[in-house]
Amino acid sequence: MEPHENIDKMYFRFNDMVKDLECLGKEYSLGEKNRKILNALPKEWEPKSIAIEESKNLNSMPIDSLINYLTSFELKLKYKLQDEEAKGKRSISFKVSSKRRKDSRKPHFNNFQITWDNCNSDGEVEEEYEKAQMAFMALGNNEVSSSCDSCDDSCDNDNDDVESFIFKMHECLKESYAKNKELKIKINTLLSANSKLVHKNNSLTKENDVLKEKFVGKTKIMEEQGSLKKRLDDLDVTLKTKKENVFEKKRTRNMFLNKNFITFRKNDLCFVKSKSSFYGNKNIICNYCHQHGHIKKNCYVKINEKLRINSIWVIKHATNPIGPKKVWAPKVVTSLCM
């Protein structure tokens, strides 16, 4: 802090330096800034800086409150210096006036002492007495005038000091009023900007909530689609396997139907001779298949051949109508017979 600077100028210069350092990449914490401001103060401010460090927490104390404390202490120092200067001027003026009074009193009292000579005339005595009274009155007037002059001088000096002090206070008041006005304008702009930001934040939170709900709904739909797709794939696989099985069965059935008797009778679809069954006597021979144990009526070869013949549905009594058979005969001409 320079000697001709006040707290406000020092703070503005400090703020500019800190901003320049921040642009260069150097950042300071709140406690470091407060300590640097207190260390920059002159020796006269040392008791105040020590008291602030002991009573306040510099790491959490805002810079504005610190500047307010320092400005108030600065005004107190100014008042104290002005009072000391006024007291010094008053003491000097009082000493000068007292010396003047002493110097002015000596010749008057020495010059105006009453002397008596050997003259016994009453007229001369009265004249001398009148002269002494006039001189005493003049001396009193001179003393009163000198004391009044000294009082007027001291009062003038006091008035000048008071006027200068009032002028300085008026200037400080003007500066503080202008700063207060600027700060009010800044506060109003910041409040309006803050209200706009709050409104924008509320709208963004609402939009965020709506988007979250939409996202949750979309995720649910995607999960349902995934599960349905998986189920559809499973159904496609099962349908494909079933279709293949059906086609395979149909293909094997057609193949079995087109094969010979021996290979065809191995499946469950046709009649197979039971190994445990026994048809009568082994000495009996079938006239159809020429095997022992059964007759032609119970021959399983003949039965299976009948099963392989395609049957056709015919309406009942359509092939053999009821009634006598009609025989064709030529028509007889009756006119010729006549």
Image (cartoon, rainbow, N blue to C red):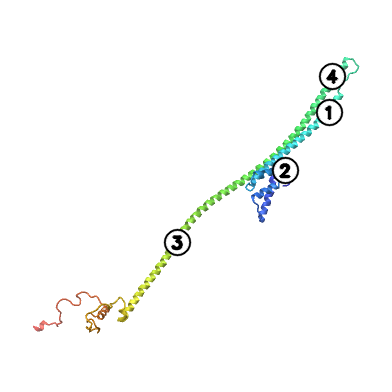
Residue 132 versus residue 43 in the image, above or below: above
Q: Name the element at disc 1.
A: helix
- Amino acid under label 4? Glu
The alpha-carbon separation of the residues under discs 4 and 2 comes to: 65 Å
Mark count = 4
Q: Which residue is mark 3?
A: 223
Residue at image point 70% right, 47% down: 39
Q: Position of residue 135 (x, y in %)?
A: 84, 23
- Amino acid under label 2? Glu
Q: Which residue is mark 2?
A: 44
Q: Which residue is mark 1?
A: 104
Residue 106 versus residue 256 in the image, above or below: above
Q: Which residue is mark 4?
A: 130
Name the N-terminal-most of marks 4 and 2.
2
Specify whether 336 is left or right of 168: left
Name the N-terminal-most of marks 1 and 3.
1
The 10 Å Cα crowd at callout 2, few under 14, some 14 to 19, many 20 or more, is few
Which mark is in front, 4 or 1? 1
Q: Name the element at disc 2.
A: helix
Cβ–Cβ under 8 Å for marks 1 and 3: no
Residue at image point 87% right, 15% down: 123
The alpha-carbon separation of the residues under discs 2 and 3 comes to: 76 Å
Name the N-terminal-most of marks 2 and 3.
2
Where on the picture, by quarter, is residue 115? top right
Cβ–Cβ under 8 Å for marks 1 and 2: no
Which mark is in front, 2 or 3? 2
The alpha-carbon separation of the residues under discs 1 and 2 comes to: 45 Å
The alpha-carbon separation of the residues under discs 4 and 1 comes to: 22 Å
